[in-house]
Image (spheres, rainbow, N blue to C red):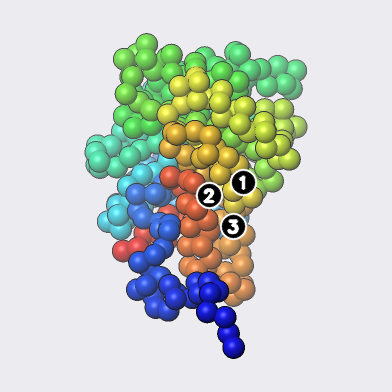
Amino acid sequence: MIPADFHRGRRLRTSLALREMVRENTVTANDLIMPYFVVETEDANFRKEIASMPGQYQLSLKELEKQVASAVALGLKACILFGIPAAKDETGSGAYDDNGIVQQAIRLLKDRWPELIVIADTCLCEYTSHGHCGLVKNEYVQNDPTLNLLARAAVAQAKAGADMVAPSDMMDGRVAAIRAALDEEGLVNVPIMSYAVKYASAFYGPFRDAAESAPQFGDRKTYQMDPPNGREAMREAVADFEEGADILMVKPGLPYLDIVRQVRDNFDTPVAVYQVSGEYSQIKAAALNGWIDEQAVVMESLVAFKRAGADMIITYFTEDVLKVLK
């Protein structure tokens, strides 16, 4: 005799319609942010696939416009821009040049699609000759002297029309410096999406190929977070929140779902997560070898972010997912 009082969870799984009715988390176009790498080049048709990120490209302004046009037709709501300048220098001047490549891209996209949310990654590493995220002295990244340059970059991006700036440098005090600079310029309505909890992760490798931003000496472990630390993540998030961050981001994604949950449980701000290049490339490589079902794995990974508490997801799979959702 089978007892009648045990839990029958399978009752709610008997059909697709029923499973969808009781589904706790879903991924929509409103959740997704697509990263783009835009190159300063005289070749208007420049489009170069990133070897370590199959399906992702470095794009000229013209090619960026074409790529975004296709994505908007699929339902793209938001993107984040990374720039690759024609020339780099020790101070990363292309980041805060009013005519820098990202500022050009912002103006292009906002003129064409005013309703598209265009976010600017705010950092120096893509623009510095040494590849670090701040000014360098004796091979050490200087915190306080870097803050003014980050603030100048954020102001240049906002003046170009960016809907949001996203400081990713991990300098102490950069959110406060950026907020003060934006407010002083009358840009009080430009929100800051802070890379509040950014680890010195091995998952960033392909991105450094894409953005051509690998450090020329040392690493970034003196300013990005140590991966074993969890309590420290809350200190970083508190600092950015108190300095004026409107959205708190955790980066990378899947290896740090516990941190996403901690941020969600401790703050009532929107929470973002970045499914980084290494996560993308691993899934792509396994799919290309026929080891996994790419679409199923991608959707499962994105639902995991939502389940952990993320409100928005930066992912290189955005365009692919929009096709599925369409």
Residue drawn at x 40%, y 20% as measured from the top left? 155
The x and y percentages for residue 285 are 61, 64
- Check contact, mark 1 vs mark 2: CB within 8 A: yes
Q: Amino acid type of disc 3?
A: Ser
Which of pointers 3 and 1 lies earlier in the amino acid sequence?
A: 1
87 relative to 80 in the view: left or right: right
Quarter of the figure that contains the C terminus: bottom left
Q: Amino acid type of disc 2?
A: Ala
The secondary element bearing badge 2 is classed as helix
Which of pointers 3 and 2 lies earlier in the amino acid sequence?
A: 3
Mark sitting on residue 258? 1
Q: Is residue 9 visible?
A: yes
Which of pointers 1 and 2 lies earlier in the amino acid sequence?
A: 1
190 relative to 127 in the view: left or right: left
Which residue lies under the disc numbered 3? 281
Hey, which quadrant is residue 252 in on the image? top right
The x and y percentages for residue 83 are 47, 36
The secondary element bearing badge 1 is classed as helix
Residue drawn at x 33%, y 39% as measured from the top left? 117
Q: CA distance from mark 3 to mark 2?
A: 22 Å
Mark sitting on residue 308? 2
Observer-nearest of 236 and 279:
236
Residue drawn at x 52%, y 79% as measured from the top left? 4
Residue drawn at x 53%, y 74% as measured from the top left? 5
In this view, the mark in front (3 or 1):
1
Q: Residues within 10 Å of mark 2 (few under 14, many from 20)?
A: many
Farthest top residue in view: 184
Please determine whether, in this image, residue 131 is positioned above or below residue 134.
below
The secondary element bearing badge 3 is classed as helix
Observer-nearest of 8 and 303:
8
